[in-house]
Image (cartoon, grey):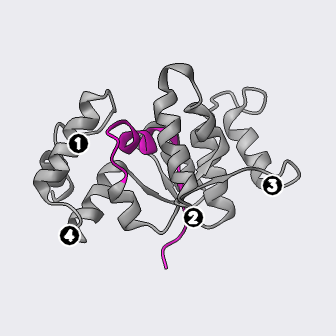
Amino acid sequence: MMKPVFYDTDCLSCFIVINDTSVLEKLFDCIYVPFEVYDEFDRPHIQDYKNRIDRLIDKGFVKIVTFDTREDDYLLYMKLSSEYFSDKPIGKGEAAAIAHAKKHNGIVASNNTRDVMPYIVKYDLERITTGDILVMALKEGIITENEGNLMWSGMLNRNRWLNADSFTAYLNKKNR
């Protein structure tokens, strides 16, 4: 059984913006989205994206997770995301994904290396990226390399930041 995977906005949005979450749905029984991430999709200009997530919630695939403000994971979230507690706060979505993953011995799904990696290391967490998810799908026979390239291209065309120009380039970089 795979550990629970907690998504931040940048990783989840890669699949939401191309309107193709089939890879996620075939790889995972369900995914966990912190309320803080869900809330980032609740903007008038991206309401369609929130509606896509709502459909995944209705199907039972996306589970929204919240904090109990009396628990240690909430305090960690505040320490990571608030200028009151930190001189270098990170985004609320990233902070929430990290705090939930730490509490539930889970995996953080994030493309944001700069902000997230120091805490992945500090709290001995696992992290996966959009690229890692597509590699998993390739290995499982869910997608072909060409389909991965089409998805990757769609994500780049929708202004998602990925660390290679194509899925093939990502695979080549990963195999070095």
Q: CA distance from mark 1 to mark 3?
A: 37 Å
Q: CA distance from mark 3 to mark 4?
A: 40 Å
- The residue labelled by disc 1 is 152
As drawn, the residue found furthest toward the bottom would be 1
Please report whichever mark, 3 or 2, sits nearer to the chain's N-terminal start.
Answer: 3
Mark 3 near mark 4, Cβ–Cβ under 8 Å?
no
Comparing labels 1 and 3, the label whose residue is closer to the camera: 1
Q: Which residue is painted at 47% across and 35% down in the image?
A: 49
- The residue labelled by disc 2 is 106
Q: Residues within 10 Å of mark 1 (few under 14, many from 20)?
A: many
The relative height of residue 166 versus residue 65 in the rendered view (above or below) is above
Please report whichever mark, 2 or 1, sits nearer to the chain's N-terminal start.
Answer: 2
- The residue labelled by disc 4 is 141
Q: Looking at numbered disc 4 in the image, what kind of residue is underneath it?
A: Gly
| Residues in magenta, as a range | 1-21
Q: Residues within 10 Å of mark 3 (few under 14, many from 20)?
A: few
Residue 28, position as x, y percentages in the image:
44, 66
Q: Is residue 70 visible?
A: yes
Q: CA distance from mark 1 to mark 4?
A: 17 Å
The relative height of residue 170 versus residue 46 in the rendered view (above or below) is below
Give SS at disc 3: helix
Q: Looking at numbered disc 3 in the image, what kind of residue is underneath it?
A: Asp
Q: Which mark is residue 72?
A: 3
Q: Looking at numbered disc 2 in the image, what kind of residue is underneath it?
A: Gly
**Quadrant, the C terminus:** bottom left
Residue 142 shown left or right of residue 41 in the figure: left
Q: Looking at numbered disc 1 in the image, what kind of residue is underneath it?
A: Trp
